[in-house]
Image (spheres, rainbow, N blue to C red):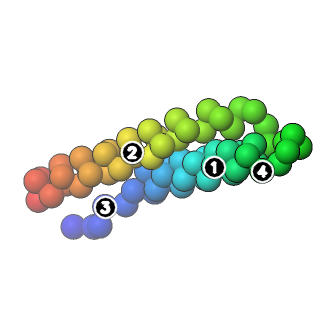
Amino acid sequence: MAPVRFENIQALRGVAVLLVVLCYLQVIEQKYSHGKIFLPDWLSYAMASVDLFLLSVVLLLLRLRVVSFSL
């Protein structure tokens, strides 16, 4: 049987990780920039990407469980 590939989930996890990094950069910028903010305000919504990352991990684990039981 061919190995199972999860390119879509891995891409989703990559986007989620990048959004989390950008969100932390915005927090650091607000703390240390002394009023000179360069990153946009909408990055504060990037904390939802933590949920997106956890959802992708759960989907991956569920998929692996279904594949392992069907063998």
Looking at the image, tell me whether mark 3 or mark 4 is earlier in sequence order.
3
Earlier residue among tags 3 and 2: 3
Q: Secondary structure at mark 1?
A: helix
CB contact under 8 Å: marks 3 and 4: no
Q: Residue at x 60, y 38 (%)?
A: 46
Residue 34 visible (yes or no): yes
Q: Kindly report which numbered mark, 1 or 3, lies closer to the viewer in this rendering.
A: 1
Residue beneath disc 2: 54
Image location of residue 21, percent across then percent down: 62, 53
Q: In the rendered structure, which amino acid carries the disc numbered 4?
A: Tyr
Marks 3 and 2 in Cβ contact (< 8 Å):
no
Residue at mark 1 to residue at mark 4: CA–CA distance: 12 Å
Q: Nearer the viewer, residue 5 or 52?
A: 52
Label 1–label 3 contact, CB within 8 A: no
Left or right, residue 24 beside residue 58: right
Q: Tell me if mark 1 has few (under 14), some (14-19) or many (20+) residues whose alpha carbon lies within 10 angstroms of its own.
A: some
Q: Secondary structure at mark 3?
A: loop
Residue 60 in percent (x, y) is at 32, 51
Q: CA distance from mark 1 to mark 3?
A: 33 Å
Alpha carbons under labels 3 and 2: distance apart? 20 Å
Q: Position of residue 18 (x, y in %)?
A: 61, 53
Label for residue 24?
1
Find out whether the residues at labels 2 and 4 contact each other: C-beta distance under 8 Å: no
**Image quadrant occupied by the C terminus:** bottom left
Q: Give the labeled residue for mark 4.
A: 32
Amino acid type at mark 2: Leu
Question: What amino acid is found at the position of numbered circle 1 in the picture?
Answer: Tyr
Residue on which the image places disc 3? 4
Q: Earlier in the sequence, mark 1 or mark 3?
A: 3
Label 2: how many residues lie within 10 Å, few (<14), some (14-19) or many (20+)?
few
